[in-house]
Image (cartoon, rainbow, N blue to C red):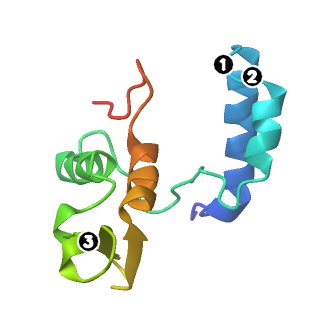
Amino acid sequence: MTAVMPNANDLEPLFRLEVLNMLKQEGKITESVIENMDTWHHSGFHVYCSDVILPGDEESLERLARYVIRAPLSQERMVYMGASEGTGMDQVIYTGKRNRVKKRFTALDWLARLVTHIPSKGEQLVRY
């Protein structure tokens, strides 16, 4: 007998609903926060339905742990250009990892995007 592989696209909205309901019941978020999140282009949730990682599979667990704690951006793909370099204003050029597309930001726009990765006081982003 073969197991049926679940479809992540079907599970993601259900997972999102369960998590948001749990957070609302615990008093961590309000209905207005949920309504705001409903307007987001990307839900912020993901369901992984690929290869199973068994508890004794140290190599796969290590690979998954490394993925989870990776940095949200790479300094090697970021180039800072000061205003004195002919641009007229400070800029950052960032090259995407997958598509290698270069995006240009003013220094302030870059900082605005960067601070979204800074956790709030007491918030933990990496779990071991």
Amino acid type assigned to the residue bearing label 1 in the image = Lys
1 w.r.t. 43: above or below: below
**Between residues 2 and 73, which one lies in front from this camera angle?**
73
Q: Residue 15 versus residue 82: which sits nearer the camera?
A: 82
* Mark 1 vs 3: CB contact within 8 A: no
Q: Residues within 10 Å of mark 2 (few under 14, many from 20)?
A: some
The residue drawn where x is 26% and y is 71% is: 83
Left or right of 80? Residue 107 is: right
Lateral position of residue 17 relative to residue 82, left or right = right
Residue at horizontal 33 percent and vertical 46 percent from the top: 54
Label 3 Cα crowd, 10 Å radius (few <14 / some 14-19 / many 20+): few
What residue occupies the far top of the structure in this picture? 27
Tell me which label, 1 or 3, sits earlier in the chain.
1
Residue drawn 73% across the image and 44% down it:
37
Task: List the residue tagged with mark 2.
Answer: 24
Q: What SS does tag 1 mark?
A: loop
Q: State which quadrant residue 19 falls in.
A: top right
Disc 1 versus disc 3: distance between alpha carbons? Answer: 44 Å
Q: Position of residue 122 (x, y in %)?
A: 40, 18
Contact, CB < 8 Å: mark 2 with mark 1?
yes
Q: Around disc 1, counting alpha carbons within 10 Å, would you say few (fewer than 14), some (14 to 19), or many (20 or more)?
A: few
Q: Give the labeled residue for mark 1.
A: 28
**Label 2 vs label 3: CA separation?**
47 Å
Per the rendering, the mark at residue 106 is: none
Query: 35 or 51, which lies in front?
Result: 35
Q: Which residue is mark 3?
A: 83
